Image (cartoon, rainbow, N blue to C red):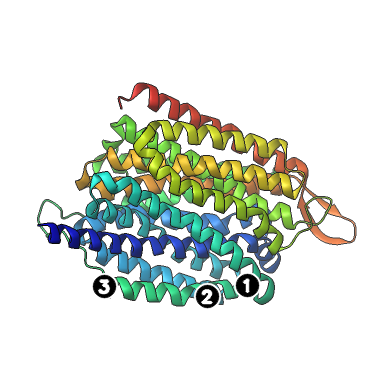
Amino acid sequence: MTLEKEKIDRSAWLILGTLSCLGLIAMYAETMVLPAIPAFIRDFGMPYNTSSWILSSYMIAGAVATPIAGKLSDVYGRKKILLIVMSIYSIGILAGGFANSLPFMLAARAAQGVGISMFPIAFGIIREVLPEKKLAVGQSVFSATFPAGGTLGLLVGAGIIRNYGWHATFFTVFPVAVILGLFILKFIHIGSLPHTPENKTSIDIKGSVALAITIISFLGGISYLENNTGQGFESIIFFAVTIVSLTVFIAIEKRTSFPLIDLKLLTNKMLLFGILILLIVGLCTFMVYQTIPIMIQSPQPLGFGGTELTTAAIQLPFMIIFLIGSITSGFALNKIGNKRLTVIGTIVSTIGFFSLLLFHSSDYMVTITLAIIAAGLSFAFIGGFNIVLLSTPIQFAGIALGMTLLLNLIGQSIGPSIAGMFEQMHRSTIQGVSGSFPTPEAYNLIFLTAAAISLTSVVFALSLNRKVVA
């Protein structure tokens, strides 16, 4: 019995290590995109509010694909769906390297976004193969690969962009993604669910379409919210479509037997509060993600006048602190509990956002405030996801995690759009430099909005800690 238990443990840790590489390579690829945002704006000749779609298209595709993939993984087997998703992601990465226009790039980014649905599948596998006592450690190991990949992406990606251009960043990721997929196919063995009437399901196509229309129209409305009064009518139309499509989506989800968002699961207060906290944290984080590279690389006096390497140097401590925090928070879960950890994380990250609002006039100040934000985010993410994991029956793990990541991705897609809106609304020119650039007022509004929204995550965390029985 001891030998059998030892074999199970070794297999579980092998699976954990392999799945952790998914987070490593995905964040490596995504972080390399961040320093290139100003280059995308320049090369594709797009305004700042449109530049947000470089990140948002990735998030929207992930938001739509994630619950579908999570549900399919519960039915047809997690390994099979995982490999299909990885194949789509690899195609998107390769296409990104050949992108020569904005529509081409957005299509490639959408294919890459489908790859986000790998993560709830991976979380479900980790919960399946690890005992509950080791789940916190396994979760922290897997989560730590995200900031680790981000750190690697900043270190390597900025140099690649500087010396070889942003196309080369995608070409460095593609072979690694293919090799990782082949390794999972050959060496990772995960039990699949039997095809019984109880677990067979259908894809909620109508709900998926309604959800996609809702997100895209909402972000489109935000994109048109600028000081050009001639575009006010377009913004109203987009928001009207959002309201209609959201109403239709809710009606569909109430009627269908297999909804993308199971409203019945959201009656669980722990699950609902955990999801809302992760949504808010994701929104605020990506609002800042969109802003920092543009602020650093804009010419003085409107920006710092830095390069891609400057951007990487300023953002690197954020990733390092996030990495350390993700690792240590796994051990803190067992000592102080997921609800207290989430409260601490949301408070610290909110303090960081307010600090960024007050102190962002130099490289050093931005670096320090980003580090504070990272410390809080690492605790909030680990605590929030652990709340979701442990408050959901294991048979609904794929659905709940897919739904959680969906709403988190919606928040992450909204963040860059808000940032792009303020950057487009408040621009100025510099004598002798072509083009216009965001003004300090734009950055103040972005950081103020992020701080104010982050405060609501503290409210939810405190409510969860006070009202929900531990």
Residue 277 found in image quarter: top left
Between label 2 and label 3, give the one nearer the viewer. Answer: 3
Of the image marks 2 and 1, the number of the one nearer the N terminus = 1
Q: Which mark is residue 160?
A: 1
- The alpha-carbon separation of the residues under discs 2 and 1 comes to 9 Å
Pick the front one: 344 or 105 = 344
**344 relative position to 367: left or right:** left
The N terminus - image quarter: bottom left
Q: Which residue carries the number 3 mark?
A: 187
Instruction: Judge whether 257 appears above or below 83 on screen.
Output: above
Secondary structure of the residue carrying tag 2 is helix
- The alpha-carbon separation of the residues under discs 3 and 1 comes to 32 Å
Secondary structure of the residue carrying tag 3 is helix
Label 3 packing within 10 angstroms: few (<14), some (14-19), many (20+):
few
Secondary structure of the residue carrying tag 1 is helix
Amino acid, disc 3: Phe
Instruction: Judge whether 330 appears above or below 2 on screen.
Output: above
